[in-house]
Image: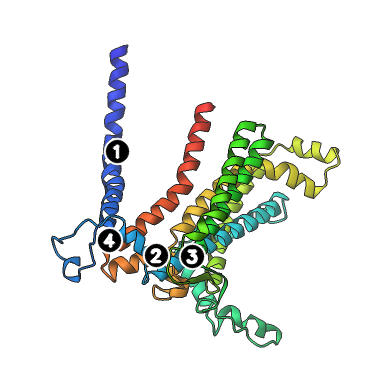
Amino acid sequence: MRWRKHTNQITGFLVVLPSIVLVAVFVYGFIGRALWASLTDWGKDPSQALALNPVTRFIGLQNYRELFTGFIDGRFRQDMVSTVFFTVFFLAGCLLFGLLLAILIDHKPRGEALFRGVFLFPFALSFVVTGTIWRWLLQPGGGVNQLPTLVGLRPATFEWLTSRQQVWRFDWNDLPVIIGLLAAATLAAVAVVARRAGRRRRAIGFALGSAAVLGLAVGVAPGWRPLPFPELHGFNLAFIGIVVAAVWQMAGYTMALYLAGLTGIPEELREAAVVEGANEWQLYTRIILPLMAPITLSAMIVLGHISLKIFDLVFAMAGPDNAWTDVPALLMFITTFRGNQFAKGAAIGVILLVLVAMIIVPYLRSQLRKGVRE
């Protein structure tokens, strides 16, 4: 019996061994290769960039230092700021419209199946197709700008994908203070949640951490200036069109997640809340939405990692040369395959990997721990 058990284990291991080898080589091996390339000067010498056996030297974190503090890499820093704004508006739009559409369908309107298919259809398209469609719709001289003419008004003049106007501008040198304040606010919010959940020690720890980070942000961070000169960054209004297209495509996915959660809530629970005197607003805000918090978190994780590595939608809508709609993934493509600066392109890729890992890894860890407890 023991021999048969060991045989089954060996057989199972041999079955998954090819997948392990392939993942190790083509995923983690390439990640390691990109990380090593980012620590070299590959591409700084044009004669060695495309050589069959390029001669490179190890320069440590110099490429990363240049990206965040170098004089000529302001475009990368603006791309990082644009990605943050895009992520915030993309998440907010998808969650809000997805929830509203799910609530609408949950009320069982006439033609429910048709509405469900119409709202979910954009999710079946690729970002390239979506980008091509919305590029036609958002032409400055036509498309959406011509809608007012249908009611006898003058056409709109908003430059959807070509606008060079920025709002909410800030100095890059203030970034350490901004990050410190956001981290302190996040820790404080976690402390409040832990306190309400009855985890007093954990709440005290997060509260103390929030106070410490706040002290560093106010007392220490203002003295650290990444750049010796002011460099203003903000939200490019040209990104509005890209946010609209992205929300149009992914809101259906969020709707499907919320709709699955809504259909899983027992009808008896809703009826009991109504009997207790809860109105429609209280029913959703105090009962249904708290029950769907795990779904909201899952949607935020998926949408967040999509927004951080967005490439094809921006490429299809605005092209690779429109700096006002640039994102780090697109800049990585240009830097690597146009500028032949392979080390700096690899550094941008590693930074994107770290950002995505900061979102995915804690979520996977919590899910694994939850599965072990269950």
Left or right? Give the position of 153 relative to 39.
right
Q: Is residue 71 above or below residue 114?
A: below
For residue 285, say whether it is visible. yes
Report which residue position mark 3 lands on.
173
Residue name at image x 41 percent, y 70 percent: 74
Q: Quadrant of residue 226?
A: bottom left
Q: Whole-Å distance between the Cαs marked 1 and 2?
A: 39 Å
Q: Whole-Å distance between the Cαs marked 4 and 2?
A: 17 Å
Categorize mark 4 by other alpha carbons within 10 Å: few (<14), some (14-19), many (20+): many
Q: Are marks 4 and 3 in contact (CB under 8 Å)?
A: no
The amino acid at mark 3 is Asn
Report which residue position mark 1 lands on.
20
Left or right? Give the position of 139 relative to 25.
right
Report which residue position mark 4 lands on.
343
Instruction: Looking at the image, tell me whether mark 1 or mark 4 is earlier in sequence order.
Output: 1
Q: Whole-Å distance between the Cαs marked 1 and 4?
A: 28 Å
Which is more foreground, mark 1 or mark 4?
A: 4
Categorize mark 3 by other alpha carbons within 10 Å: few (<14), some (14-19), many (20+): many
Q: Secondary structure at mark 3?
A: helix
Instruction: Looking at the image, tell me whether mark 4 or mark 2 is earlier in sequence order.
Output: 2
Report which residue position mark 2 lands on.
69
Categorize mark 2 by other alpha carbons within 10 Å: few (<14), some (14-19), many (20+): some
Q: Are marks 1 and 4 in contact (CB under 8 Å)?
A: no
